[in-house]
Image: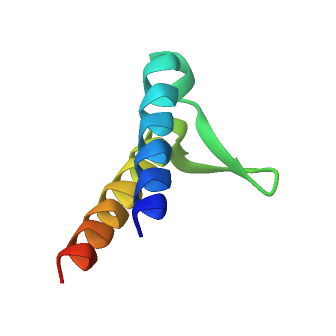
Amino acid sequence: MGDFRNEVSNAYCNIIDIDNTLDKETKSLPRRHGGTENSDTVGELIDDVKLFIENLFNEVSESEVV
């Protein structure tokens, strides 16, 4: 399970780097899905991915303890 945990940790570091690289203007752009704009912004999507990866990491960590 250690390799998967490392991959999840790497994915988290990558999304943090993306978050830190993008400027405020870019993060405020509306998300596009299927050619249509939505109320979500790019920044909100990044936050959702960070939260998902954090939760996944916690689940992997907890499963290693059991």
Residue 9 falls left or right of residue 32? left
**Number of marks in the image?**
0
Residue 3 to residue 20: above or below = below
Q: Nearer the viewer, residue 56 or 26?
A: 56
Residue 53 to residue 23: above or below = below
Q: Residue at coordinates 18% horizontally, 84% vertically from top-left?
A: 66
Residue 51, percent from left and from top: 34, 54
Residue 17, percent from left and from top: 47, 26
Residue 64 falls left or right of residue 43? left
Residue 10 to residue 3: above or below = above
Residue 27, percent from left and from top: 50, 28
User: Which quarter of the figure has residue 58?
Assistant: bottom left
Residue 42 falls left or right of residue 61? right
Q: Nearer the viewer, residue 34 or 6?
A: 6
Residue 45, percent from left and from top: 50, 47
Q: Residue at coordinates 49% horizontally, 15% vertically from top-left?
A: 23
Residue 15 falls left or right of residue 50? right
Look at the image and tell me in which quarter the N terminus lies. bottom left
Q: Residue furthest right?
A: 35
Q: Residue furthest front?
A: 2
Q: Nearer the viewer, residue 23 or 50?
A: 50
Q: Residue at coordinates 36% horizontally, 65% vertically from top-left?
A: 56
User: Which quarter of the figure has residue 63?
Assistant: bottom left
